[in-house]
Amino acid sequence: MGNDATRVVVTGLGAITPLGADAPGTWQAMLAGTSGVRVLEDEWAQRLPCRIAARAAVEPTTVIDRVQARKLDRCEMFALMAAREAWADAGSPHVDPLRLGVAVASGIGGISSVLSAYDTLKEKGWSRLSPFTVPMLMPNGSAGWISIELGARAGVHTPVSACASGAEAIGYGIEMIRNGRADVVVAGGTEAAILELNIGAFAAMRALSLRNDEPERASRPFDRGRDGFVLGEGAGILVLEAESHAAHRGARVYAVAAGAGYSADAHHIAQPEPQAIGAVLAIRHALADAHVDAAQVTHVNAHATSTPAGDVVEAQAIAAALGPAASGVVVSATKSMTGHLLGGAGAIESVAAILALRDKTAPPTINLDDPEDDLGVEIAVKPTDLHARTGGPMAVVNNSFGFGGHNVAVVFTEV
Amino acid sequence: MAMTQDEILTGLSEIIDEIAGVPADEVTPEKTFVDDLDIDSLSMVEIAVAAQDKFGVEIPDDQLKDLKTVQDVIDYVERASVSA
């Protein structure tokens, strides 16, 4: 059975993102500094002030079986695709179903299904609603479908914490293994919200970039010219595994999923607390949970969404949390390329952080032409070598923050 | 004009292929929806609604639960369309 000494490792990765149809494709595009942001040609987009977004690199209905696709929301399709990739990447292990769990999150859930069902309801009445409407719209639908496909019976969980959801799900998965509820957990997040309602609603918050004429330059975290985030879509999934279970089957191990830290701002429903006390606490809690010294941290995949309010505060939080060890840490904001995947963000950014650790290379932050002065940390603008600064294993951190005041940091280390 | 049993079977097979992905040649009259064709109760509701549209008959829920086999649906649609 598990206990605090149970180490959790990452043995499989999957991702469907604006940059690629899988994790390796996404990572290569990231290292090349590719933007996934495009102009939206949809007729509905022409009514909105924001007409750009980062759609997934592959249309899920071309991959998911036609009959199954009738029962799935788009976010559930992304989650299943990423889960299948991650599971195969882990070697499709034989796991006792009672020891296999799922923790897969979404910030919003099946919003496209909500909207199309409401149209059907108004036009044709209740009797023409798909009997699968409820499982398509519920945020835990993705986790449920993955559980069914893999026969995972140790528990199925869906933390919902807006843009921190994907990272929180990974933290929950680590906890399931540590506390002995599972040997293997499929964990991550998914989102599919590039729709008139969502873009309109984020635009109503004045949260989105309106750089419609320069889509590839619109997402520019830490740059003085940033004017909001760009909505992305897709999913990221990790296979988390008790180290002893992975060793017993001779699994390839990417990294140790060393720990997670949480805090809440208790400040404003959608704005960051200006002193970033909560973000600092989450990072410090994560390092303590992982038994990692600040000096072991070589890279941070920042939440940095390209909004005027958030980025600088986060950079300062990273500097404050790491203290003197912050000098020499390489920070990347991969949302500059993927856009913001909301509940999928923490998951695909954990995939990126793990691959950065594997390759000892931080991915670039594109569009950082005119950085803010008082960031206090080095931001990678090109692929940047990572160097160990202590004798201990190198560590990387993924930050994720969500509306509601959720702060989550996840730590991965070398084995 | 009343449909023949073969016409109903053909139309029903198209619906089942579309909704449940069961090839038409597997949809034979003696097959049960749940055990033989592996169609769950939610997909059965979808099939019933599509059948109502296609054949122009009503299939109330209390009748639907008694339609266990492909032949049951064929007989029901035949009777209902005659009386319609």
Image: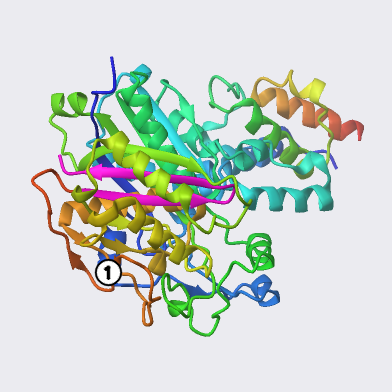
Residue sitting at the far front: A324
Residue B55 x %, y %: 78, 41
Verify whether residue A405 appears in magenta: yes
Q: Residue at x 25, y 64 (%)?
A: A28
Residue range of the region highlighted in magenta in the rendering: A395-415
Determine whether, in the image, residue A383 is placed left or right of residue B67: left
Nearer-the-camera pick, A329 or A148: A329
Residue sitting at the far bottom: A213
Nearer-the-camera pick, A221 or A61: A221
Q: Quadrant of residue A178?
A: top left
Question: Which residue is identified by label 1?
Answer: A380
Residue A361 x %, y %: 19, 61
Determine whether, in the image, residue A236 is placed left or right of residue A118: left
Q: Residues within 10 Å of mark 1 (few under 14, many from 20)?
A: many
Residue sitting at the far top: A1
The overriding secondary structure of the stretch rendered in magenta is strand
Quadrant of the frame with the N terminus of chain A: top left
Nearer-the-camera pick, A67 or A255: A255
Is label 1 in a helix, a strand or a loop? loop
Mark yes or no: residue A384 visible: yes
Determine whether, in the image, residue B78 is placed left or right of residue B13: right
| Amino acid at circle 1 | Ala
Quadrant of the frame with the C terminus of chain A: top left
